[in-house]
Amino acid sequence: MLGNVIHPYRVSSRLDAARSILTMDEPVVRSALVLPILAYHSIDEFGTSISVAPEVFRRQMRWFSVHGWTTLGLGDAANRLRSGGKIPPKSFVLTFDDGMASLLTEAAPVLSEHGFQAATFVVTGLVGREPVWYRMPAPYRTTPLLDRAGLEQLVEMGWELHPHTHDHPVLPHLPLEVQADQIGRCQSLIREWFGQAGGVLAYPFGQLNEDTRRAMKQCEMRAGVTLQFGSRHDPADPYAWPRIGSAWFKRSIFRQRLAVTGWLERYVSMRSLVKKGRERHFLTPTAETTRGLIDVRE
Ligand SMILES: [Zn+2]
C-alpha cells in the first residue's frame, strides 16, 4: 500500500493501468492524496476565459453522475487531505471562485439535480457588487457577485462558503499584517454572517508568498488552494494545493475525463519538461494579474 507516501502515478497493477487506459473512468493515480479539486468561476454564456457555458456545465455534471463520481465537501476534503486520510475512489471537489450571481441561477440547480456538493469563495468586502478585478472591454462581461441574501440561499441549498479575502487584492504585494487582515476579516465575516466554518482560502489570482503562508497560519486556516494545475495534494504543505481550472476541460468531455483521471496532469508535466518555462495558461501570473487585473477575453 502507498500509505502516506506521495507517489502519484503508481498504479496498483499492470492490469489496472491497462484498464485505466481503455476506460479512462477510474483515476490512474492510486495515492490517497490525489483528489481533483475543480476550479470554476462563472457559468454563463458570455464566452470569456472565466465562463463555462450552462449547457457545457450540465453535460459535465451529467458525465460525473453517469460514471459514478461523487463529490466531497471542500471542508471534509481539506481535513482528509491534511491528515492523509482516505479519499474515496471516484470522488472530486467542486469549487467556484468569487461567489458570482450565476452560481445561484445556473450552477446550483444542476448540482441539486445530481446531489453534488460545492463550495464558493467569497470576497466579503464586495458582496453584491461588480468583480472589479476583471478587465472587460465590450462586449465581454460577467455576472455581478452575489449579495448576502444570494449567498444565504446557496447555504440553504447545502453550499459551503470559504474565504477569498476581503477585497481580492494580490496578496504578495501586501505586507504580512495587511495580508493577515484580508484573510482573517473575510473568515470572521463568513462565520458571523452565515454561521459557516470556512477555513479553506482561495488565493486571489492564485498568488501567494512566504508572508501569505505566515498570515494563513496566524489566521488558523486549514488549507489554501491555488490556480496551479494539478490534483496531488501534499498534507505537509496544505497552503499551496493545486486545482484543475475549468479552462482545461471546458471544450470536451474527453479532456474532462483526462483531467479528473490524472492523464491530463501526466501529459502537462511531460510537456512542461519539454517546454520548460514556456507554459502560460489560465490565470498563471502575468503582467496583468500582478497588477491585480485579469483580462477575461478568450
Ligand atoms: Zn477571484
Image: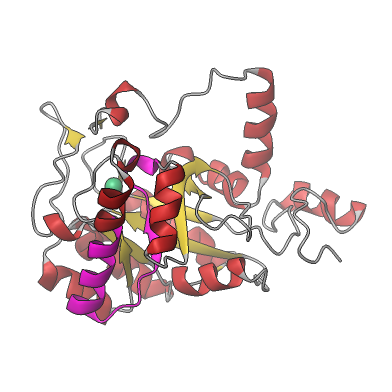
Would residue 130 be found to the left or right of residue 187 on screen?
left
Q: Nearer the viewer, residue 24 or 5?
A: 5
Point out residue 160 in the picture as x, y percentages from the top left corner: 34, 72
Residue at (50%, 54%) from the top-left corner?
239
Q: Is residue 26 visible?
A: yes
Residue at (30%, 58%) from the top-left corner?
183
Seen in the picture, residue 100 relative to 109 is either above or below; the reply is above
Image-quadrant location for residue 147: bottom left
Seen in the picture, residue 110 relative to 280 is either above or below; the reply is below
Point out residue 146 in the picture as x, y percentages from the top left corner: 15, 61
Could you tell me which quadrant the C terminus lies in? top left
Point out residue 179 in the picture as x, y percentages from the top left corner: 30, 50
Colour pattern: secondary structure
Magenta stretch: includes residue 202: yes
Could you tell me which quadrant the N terminus lies in? bottom right
Magenta span dominant secondary structure: helix
Would residue 147 be found to the left or right of residue 237 on screen?
left
Seen in the picture, residue 275 relative to 56 is either above or below; the reply is above
Q: Is residue 71 visible?
A: no
Q: How many marks?
A: 0
Magenta stretch: includes residue 35: no
Q: Nearer the viewer, residue 34 or 180?
A: 180
Per the rendered image, the range of residues in magenta is 183-207
Image-quadrant location for residue 187: bottom left
Would residue 49 be found to the left or right of residue 84 on screen?
left
Point out residue 173 in the picture as x, y percentages from the top left corner: 30, 36
Residue at (10%, 27%) from the top-left corner?
138
